[in-house]
Image (cartoon, rainbow, N blue to C red):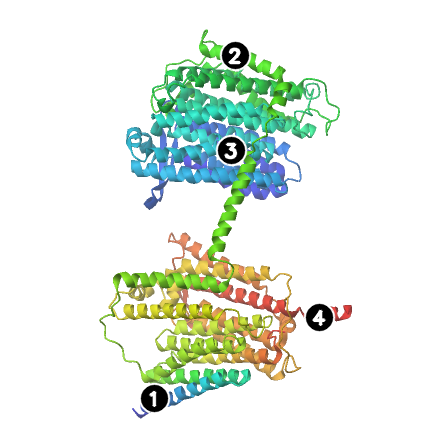
């Protein structure tokens, strides 16, 4: 029971940090800030999914978390590469 | 069964003939000739039954709901045409072997000829009229290919296009006509239709159906005013002209008249339309033929004229007239095929077909001279030749038609028929005289392009066989009378007339008309020069020019229409589409009103509210940043991420996983394109226009929202229950999404992967040899191209991601996953290597041919589908098996897995092709940059 309450509170906190990510992305000021904001949002999304899995007591969600981790990494790498070099596949 | 074999044999020969033709021309010819000869033998086994008056039919069901059956019929008419098609076909195959140059690909020629032969047999033997139309169109297409056989000649391509345009268009009219007749009669079976003459004639739609069917027949048989495609089709190789455009295909039109005669004739509209078209064509074409210098052109117009004669016979519609028509079909096919072959020989041996250049060939080409003269006499209708008999019959029925009860609107002008018939016969005499006189008599022309001599026996022997029949029929008509009457019975739909085909009937009006024609023709030929100079005073009317102008006008107006709503502006295009969809939606709302449903609303969990808020905010931010492209891409990723979270949250893990992978691949593609695009979108539209777009999109969005709300608050029976229920027992997998993709809707998936492959190939082709016009305005911030941190992390990442891709693939049938997601994930694993280490490094190590991989994927998917046939199950129906592998455990093998493998390979192949191509588009590889530096 206490676990459920804890999970719900954590979910609320994570949601709040997603809002903060969005704020960073909206404000910038540099594009690099937005990219970092997106990457952090990926991480928060992973946390959200894992929490959802724990709450619903199923491991079906974990692969989604793993996939977000991988895809988020690739997305961020591509954006950073573009930011630094302009051409992502040189 | 024999009938099915007869029709199928030529089709079965297409591939062997084609393949063998590349290696050995002779064997290719033998196979083709043997095929048509054996089909002829098979047909001959049916002949005794047909000759005793039977109508043989047999049928197999095909698409029953459409009334389409694989039904065949052999009666006298089909027998006559079958003998002509297969018999003359065999001779043409032999002739073509000697005629075609060694450089001409003979395999594809025979393949097309076999296609045509099969299609033509299908037309004449169809018992189902829809089947008939299908084969009909196939003859148009194969004729198109054969006319354009010499692809390098512009005239051949134009002629082919024109023939397809006219005969194909006529075929569409015919289809409409047949559908109408089917509607009137209630059946597409020929037997039923032919027995429903009164029903059809009494129906309100009779006239429409008649005109549509006649359009089909007249375009195919080159009747005025659709005649001009035939002379232009003469750019085909001569064997094609002699086979398709004199003996068989153009006869399909008159065949149709004969076939439908029992059902459609007997009205005054039939009489006026058919006889009118036939008589006009007869006279007009015979007159034009008189002034053609090209031998094939002359013969083409002569063919049109003779087809007009046959059409007129069926128009007169009496027993004797139809018998004359049938008889003339047979005679004309034989003498005209031999004449075309003779013209081909002359062309082949002298290098020209121009009657003004050719002269005095009787000395150098005695065999050709003899054969061509006999065939020409048959064409002119001289006594003791086949053409004489049928032409005499035609003259007689033209004379008798002066008191035809069906004359209708043209009553009072019936005297025109015998007059016009005599005029046609007269011109026909004259051009026959000219054909022989100009080419073979007179002084020998020493300046011919080649030194003329008689051809090898392979070229003249087929002509000799045909000429033998011309003479045999002419001398001993009683031998053929029985056969002709059996054919005529099929056209009349009753007993044959009381008539005896004979050379001498006494002093009849027809004999007088023949006499006038012979004398007049001879006089005409004597004064040909003065008549020709009179004729050339008038500007020629070219059907070709009119047709081309018509085509161009049609294209131009189609362009104008398209430009009216799609002027190339993406904004306008989207605005039109969304605007129309909104309009349609609001129309429904306006008419029926909108009420919310009665279901209780689900309480939104508070945790979910924030992501939804983020989704809306991110969408708004995408719009706010849309000019700053990179920022917009970042914002779009947020939208994608939240959407996949929502999918996962609402128990759609497959969708979530797919959305995630698609998201990343999309970002990669957009970033690749952004490199060659400006970083900022300029402000292009006026405030008014932006306002319009805003209103439009808000209206569309709110409308969709209202629709969704209305639907989701109502109780409903969705299709998902069906899938949930049937997934395991019928698809063999518990992951319903995957089972739908690879089994229930496997056909869709197959189409989609094919589209994906086509798109990839399209991108490759469109970017072929191109470089970006404007250089990018992104300045690199760091010098290091491949940071060590990145390269080092991506190597183990690749292995990890590939393992996950494999895992997702393997369990896809029962748990979230499958070939599509696995393909996306695996592609990402490979693409990050390009990202981290550059394309030169990666290409050196990743030597897979991805185009081949994708193509192989499509093939695997198709083969999996076909494999179901082996178990006598419908296409793509899945099967399953459980295999125990020591060490790993139970493995679940569904045929769906091999289909999924195909999907996987296509996804990986297509994505990698696109990514590699786009990256090459950028700056060329390093070597190229180096070499450019050297040049400076």
Q: Indicate which disc residue B516 carries.
A: 2
**Camera-side residue: B792 or B661?**
B661
Q: Quadrant of the N terminus of chain A?
A: bottom left
The residue beneath circle 1 is A8
Look at discs 1 and 3 and give the one toward the viewer.
Answer: 1
Tell me the SS state at disc 3: helix
| Disc 2 to disc 4: CB gap under 8 Å | no
The residue beneath circle 3 is B36
Q: Residue at x 52, y 48 (%)?
A: B556
Look at discs 2 and 4 and give the one toward the viewer.
Answer: 2
How far, Cα to Cα, is label 2 from label 3?
Answer: 42 Å
The residue beneath circle 4 is B929
Chain identity of mark 3: B
| Disc 4 to disc 1: CB gap under 8 Å | no
Chain identity of mark 1: A
When the figure is inspected, residue B509 is found, relative to residue B536, above or below; the finding is above
- Residue B16: give x, y in percent of width and height: 55, 42
Q: Report the label total.
A: 4
Tell me the SS state at disc 4: helix
When the figure is inspected, residue B803 is found, relative to residue B759, above or below; the finding is below
């Amino acid at each position: 029971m206490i676990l459920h309450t804890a999970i719900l509170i954590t979910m609320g906190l994570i949601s709040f940090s997603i809002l903060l990510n969005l704020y960073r992305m909206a404000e910038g000021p540099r594009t690099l800030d937005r990219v970092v904001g997106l990457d952090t949002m990926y991480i928060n999304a992973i946390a959200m999914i894992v929490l959802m899995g724990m709450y619903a007591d199923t491991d079906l969600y974990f692969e989604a978390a793993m996939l977000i981790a991988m895809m988020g990494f690739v997305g961020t790498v591509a954006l950073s590469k573009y930011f630094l070099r302009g051409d992502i596949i040189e | 069964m024999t009938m099915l074999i007869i029709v199928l044999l030529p089709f079965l020969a297409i591939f062997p003939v084609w393949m063998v033709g590349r290696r050995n021309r002779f064997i290719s010819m033998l196979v083709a000739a043997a095929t048509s000869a054996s089909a002829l033998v098979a047909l001959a086994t049916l002949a005794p039954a047909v000759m005793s008056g039977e109508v043989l039919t047999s049928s197999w069901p095909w698409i029953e709901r459409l009334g389409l059956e694989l039904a065949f019929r052999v009666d006298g008419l089909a027998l006559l045409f079958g003998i002509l098609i297969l018999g003359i076909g065999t001779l043409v195959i032999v002739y073509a072997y000697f005629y075609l140059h060694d450089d001409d690909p003979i395999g594809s020629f025979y393949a097309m000829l076999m296609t045509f032969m099969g299609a033509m047999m299908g037309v004449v033997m169809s018992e189902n009229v829809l089947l008939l139309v299908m084969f009909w169109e196939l003859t148009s297409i194969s004729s198109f290919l054969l006319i354009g056989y010499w692809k390098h000649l512009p005239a051949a391509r134009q002629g082919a296009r024109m023939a397809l345009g006219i005969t194909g268009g006529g075929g569409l009219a015919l289809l409409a006509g047949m559908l109408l007749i089917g509607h009137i009669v209630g059946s597409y079976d020929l037997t039923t239709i032919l027995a429903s003459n009164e029903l059809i004639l009494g129906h309100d739609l009779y006239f429409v159906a008649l005109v549509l069917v006649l359009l089909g027949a007249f375009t195919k048989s080159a009747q005025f005013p659709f005649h001009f495609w035939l002379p232009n089709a003469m750019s085909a190789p001569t064997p094609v002209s002699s086979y398709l455009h004199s003996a068989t295909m153009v006869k399909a039109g008159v065949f149709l008249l004969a076939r439908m005669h029992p059902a459609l004739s007997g009205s005054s509209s039939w009489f006026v339309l058919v006889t009118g078209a036939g008589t006009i064509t007869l006279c007009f074409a015979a007159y034009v033929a008189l002034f053609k210098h090209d031998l094939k052109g002359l013969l083409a117009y002569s063919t049109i004229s003779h087809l007009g004669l046959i059409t007129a016979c069926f128009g007169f519609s009496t027993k004797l007239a139809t018998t004359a028509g049938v008889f003339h079909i047979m005679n004309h096919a034989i003498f005209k095929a031999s004449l075309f072959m003779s013209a081909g020989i002359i062309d082949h041996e002298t290098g020209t077909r121009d009657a003004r250049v050719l002269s005095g060939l009787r000395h150098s080409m005695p065999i050709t001279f003899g054969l061509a003269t006999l065939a020409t006499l048959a064409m002119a209708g001289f006594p003791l030749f086949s053409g004489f008999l049928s032409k005499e019959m035609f003259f007689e029925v033209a004379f008798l038609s002066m008191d035809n009860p069906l004359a209708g609107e043209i009553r009072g002008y019936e005297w025109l028929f015998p007059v016009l018939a005599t005029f046609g016969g007269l011109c026909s005499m004259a051009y026959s005289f000219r054909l022989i006189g100009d080419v073979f008599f007179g002084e020998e022309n020493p300046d011919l392009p080649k030194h003329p001599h008689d051809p090898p026996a392979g070229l003249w022997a087929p002509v000799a066989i045909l000429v033998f029949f011309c003479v045999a029929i002419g001398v001993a008509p009683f031998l053929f009378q029985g056969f002709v009457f059996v054919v005529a019975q099929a056209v009349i739909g009753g007993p044959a007339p009381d008539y005896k085909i004979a050379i001498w009937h006494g002093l009849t009006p027809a004999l007088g008309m023949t006499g006038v024609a012979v004398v007049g023709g001879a006089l005409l030929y004597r004064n040909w020069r003065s008549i020709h100079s009179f004729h050339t005073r008038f500007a020629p009317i070219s059907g070709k020019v009119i047709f081309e102008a018509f085509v161009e006008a049609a294209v131009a107006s189609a362009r104008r229409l398209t430009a009216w709503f799609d002027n190339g502006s993406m904004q306008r295009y989207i605005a039109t589409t969304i605007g129309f969809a909104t309009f349609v939606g609001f129309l429904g709302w306006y008419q029926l009103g909108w009420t919310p449903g009665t279901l209780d609303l689900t309480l939104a969990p508070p945790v979910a509210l924030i992501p939804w808020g983020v989704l809306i905010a991110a969408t708004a931010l995408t719009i706010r940043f849309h000019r700053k492209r990179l920022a917009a891409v970042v914002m779009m990723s947020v939208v994608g991420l939240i959407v996949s979270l929502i999918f996962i949250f609402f128990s759609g893990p497959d969708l979530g996983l797919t959305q995630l992978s698609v998201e990343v691949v999309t970002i990669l593609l957009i970033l690749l394109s952004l490199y060659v695009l400006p970083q900022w979108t300029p402000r292009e539209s006026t405030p008014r226009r932006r306002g319009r777009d805003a209103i439009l999109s808000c209206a569309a969005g709110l409308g969709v929202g209202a629709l969704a709300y209305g639907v989701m608050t109502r109780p409903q029976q969705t299709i998902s229950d069906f899938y949930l229920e049937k997934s395991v027992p019928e698809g063999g997998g518990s992951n319903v999404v995957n089972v739908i993709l690879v089994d229930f809707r496997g056909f869709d998936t197959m189409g989609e992967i094919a589209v994906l492959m086509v798109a990839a190939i399209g991108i490759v082709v469109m970017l072929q040899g191109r470089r970006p016009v404007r250089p990018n305005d992104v300045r690199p911030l760091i010098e290091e191209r491949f940071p060590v941190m990145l390269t080092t992390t991506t190597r183990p990442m690749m292995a990890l991601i590939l393992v996950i891709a494999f895992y997702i693939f393997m369990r896809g049938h029962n748990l979230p996953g499958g070939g599509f997601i696995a393909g996306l994930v695996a592609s990402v694993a490979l693409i990050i290597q390009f990202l981290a280490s550059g394309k030169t490094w990666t290409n050196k190590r990743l030597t897979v041919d991805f185009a081949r991989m994708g193509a192989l994927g499509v093939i695997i998917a198709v083969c999996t589908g076909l494999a179901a046939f082996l178990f006598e199950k419908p296409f793509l129906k899945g099967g399953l098996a459980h295999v125990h592998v020591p060490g790993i455990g139970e493995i679940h093998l569904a045929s769906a897995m091999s289909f999924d493998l195909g999907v996987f390979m296509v996804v990986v192949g297509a994505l990698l092709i696109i990514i590699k191509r786009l990256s090459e588009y950028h700056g060329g590889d390093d070597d190229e940059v180096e070499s450019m530096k050297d040049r400076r």
